[in-house]
Amino acid sequence: MHLIIPFASCAAEACQQTLQKLRLPHLERLLSRLAPANIDSADEFTRSPAHERALAAARGLQAPDGQLPWAAAQAQQLGLGSTHDAWAFVTPCHWHVAADHISMRGLESLALQEGESRALLETLQPWFAGDGIRLHYLRADQWLANGEIFRGLATASLDRVIGRNVDAWMPEGAQAAPLRRLQNEMQMLLYHHPANDLRTERGLLPINSFWLSGTGALPAAPQPAVEPDVRVAEALRGPALAGDWAGWALAWQQVDQADCAALTAALAAGERVQLTLCGERAAQRFGPERRSAVTRFLNTLARKPLWNGREPL
């Protein structure tokens, strides 16, 4: 069992203050029994955040930054297209236009319904088709799209963009130019869309743009072995992206009482477990501690009065 916890921490001062007061007994127990393994460290400007890189490694996916083919993997599970088609996730969203920047609102605040989403997709499909892109409905807040334009295209995860200036995360290069044009055209097309008129009457934000993520094709070459039981604790994501650190602390306690407790029980039952804690920059993996007989003996001595009961560094 491998538990991945995204948004376990971040550099925000309010987050760090909250973390100092947080008590997570099951996590503390796990960290006392597991040893640090590999760490995947980058910076906060990678298009693929640390938790997506950790999940990709666990699932045997290898790709450059911003090209982890999540959409292609989803399409394969649904039996869509051929094995090596290039795919993307298309997320209908709301861009808030401020005086000096444009930011993306959180998807939960949009409350997009299936009927609205299907109506928007039907309207946009012919425009996407003009650039060789075929849309497929997946769920209200996410569609699938396939087309050669997505092959080798680096895009930023939604977790990098929500609540932030979208300009810093837009796809770049000649390959991205048609997509940026398409985004501009869709903003004008959606402005007076009947679905948006109804949303405005209900006091909801209009859908005025879309975001591409999870782009690329599944590799043709064999990939490393896939870990059989990988679980991702998603509860911290919403509060962290919203900057709701009180809500984040409550979510952490829920993760500790449920997910971390389950991992602790599995470890106590003799199962091989792994834990990966992910922040904005890095993912630290913890695994079963491998200690030599000498190390075990010295650690035993360190806990006896002979050494005044002090723990070794």
Image (cartoon, helix red, strand yellow):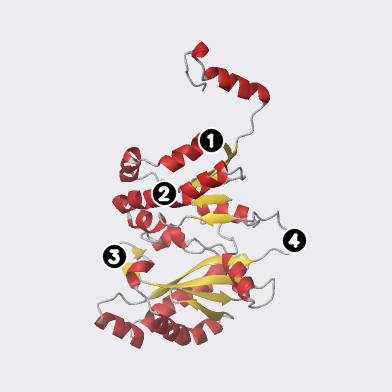
Image disc number at residue 289: none
Q: Look at discs 1 and 4 and give the one toward the viewer.
A: 1
Which residue carries the number 4 mark?
221
Contact flag, marks 1 and 3 (Cβ < 8 Å):
no
- Which residue does the numbered mark 2 point to in the structure image? 257
Q: Give the side of residue 261 with respect to residue 36, left or right.
A: left
Q: Is residue 94 above or below residue 185?
A: above
The Cα–Cα distance between marks 1 and 4, rounded to whole angstroms, is: 37 Å
- Residue 144 is situated, as x and y percent measured from the top left of the image, at 54, 75
Of labels 3 and 4, earlier in sequence is 3
- At mark 1, the secondary structure is helix
The amino acid marked with disc number 4 is Ala
Q: Which residue is mark 1?
A: 33
Residue 98 circle label = 3
Callout 1 amino acid: Arg
Say few, some or many: other residues with alpha carbon within 10 Å of mark 1 (under 14 / 14 to 19 / 20 or more): some
Amino acid carrying label 3: it is: Ala
Residue 301, position in %: x, y? 56, 17
Q: Sequence-wise, which precedes: disc 1 or disc 2?
A: 1
Q: Disc 4 to disc 2, how far (Cα)?
A: 40 Å
